[in-house]
Amino acid sequence: MTEIRPLAAEDIPAIGTLFQRVFRNPKDPAPEALLDCMRELFFRHPWRDPAIQSQVYVTPERTIGGYIGVIPLRMRLKGRVLSAAAPTTIAVAEPAKNPMAGALLLRTFMNGAQDVSVSEPINPIAVGMWEKFSARAATMESMEWLALFRPAAFAASLAAERFPLTRFGRPVAGPLDRMLARYLARDPHRVTAQNQAEVQDLPRDQFIRAFIQLADEAYDLTPDWDEETLGWQLAHASGNRKRGPLQHRLVVDRNDRVIGGYIYHAHPGGVAWVIQLLSRPDTALQVVDAMLLQLDAEGYVSAKGRTQARLVEPLLKRRALMFRRHSAMVHARDPEILAAVHEGRGITSGFAGETWTRLVSDRYTP
């Protein structure tokens, strides 16, 4: 008989090996750094809840044939505390031999104790599985945006990742981007002023307090962050070597009121990965302008992130490219929760989901 049971600490080497086999190089053993990351996420999270745990699929041979990693969350809807959860990865060792393992793992997760389940991003196959449980895609949160500051350098960097020999073309990118800059300067939609908003780089503890207050005031559905939990998440994300150092900024207006904030990874001269971007409903354009100007001034070739309903129009005004590769899914039985998400009044991605984690996005070998 097969069995679905909660993940135990002693299962980490087995699911680490499975992760390595399915998502990385199956010829190499699971790095110890990967196993440590799993232990941290699944057993040391400040919101760890015995009722919301990662699950493993046990084969008739009593081996682990699959798993679903689960991040415990807590959310708050207009002061009401909710339990929440986000799956990270689902992996099955032998899908042909155990064709129902993935579905059984997802069903166990969806039937869990949480009030709301969020996942972003997931591929079309997984979307179909979620829809069988009456989950819906959050359309605006499923979109991604890309702002190009140095188009030639961005193209050269992208090409060099896939075709190493093209790195010799990078010296040409600088002069070409300077020519493009003169042309773009005449574009009326280009960001040229901060629209009376200022970017502040504060120590992490001050940023955390202000960011939590901003989320509480600007959104109806938010993570139930406190300083310890958001600080723990930031510390975990800071170890991501592939995406680069983690940085955070606040945006304030001329009255020194916090109107927005964002958290991003970036290597010098590379792409700025904006993991979380928050704004008050009436200040989104100011926040987007301030952020884009700051990232451009620091020399990044581009910036990218996921959208929210209130951010789409400001980003389009600044000629950001919009595309959809995957979907952000939400499942809840309470219509008030779903309304907050689908009406753009909730935070369900970034540090409110699972893309802040290092599990999938980081590298674990030198």
Image (spheres, helix red, strand yellow):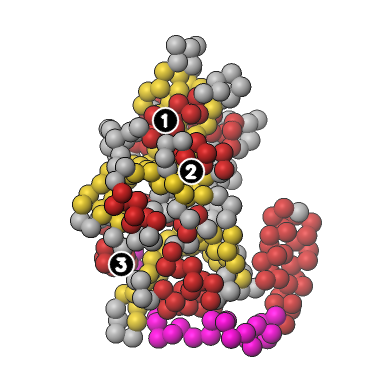
Instruction: Check disc 3 and give the amino acid type.
Output: Ala
Relative height, residue 35 to residue 254 (above, below):
above
Name the residue tied to disc 2. 359
Q: CA distance from mark 3 to mark 2?
A: 29 Å
Mark 2 / mark 1, whichever is N-terminal: 1
Highlighted magenta segment, given as a residue range = 180-206
Horizontal placement of 150 versus 220: left or right? right
Identify which amino acid the numbered label 1 is placed on: Arg
Residue at figure coordinates x 70%, y 80% from the top left: 180
Question: Which circle, 3 or 2, is nearer the viewer?
Answer: 3
Foreground of the two, 262 or 117: 117
Please state the horizontal and vertical placement of residue 10, each as a whole percent of the image.
40, 25
| Residue type at the position of mark 2 | Leu
Q: Residues within 10 Å of mark 3 (few under 14, many from 20)?
A: some
Marks 3 and 2, the one that precedes in the sequence: 3
Q: Considering the numbered disc 3 on the image, is that residue within a helix, a strand or a loop?
A: helix
| Residue 223 x %, y % | 31, 54
Tag 2 near tag 1, CB within 8 Å: no
Residue bearing the label numbered 3: 218
At x 27% / y 32%, what residue is drawn? 50
**Magenta-drawn stretch contains 55:** no
What residue is pinned by disc 1? Answer: 107
- Of discs 2 and 1, which sits in the foreground? 1
Please state the horizontal and vertical placement of residue 161, each as a whole percent of the image.
69, 55
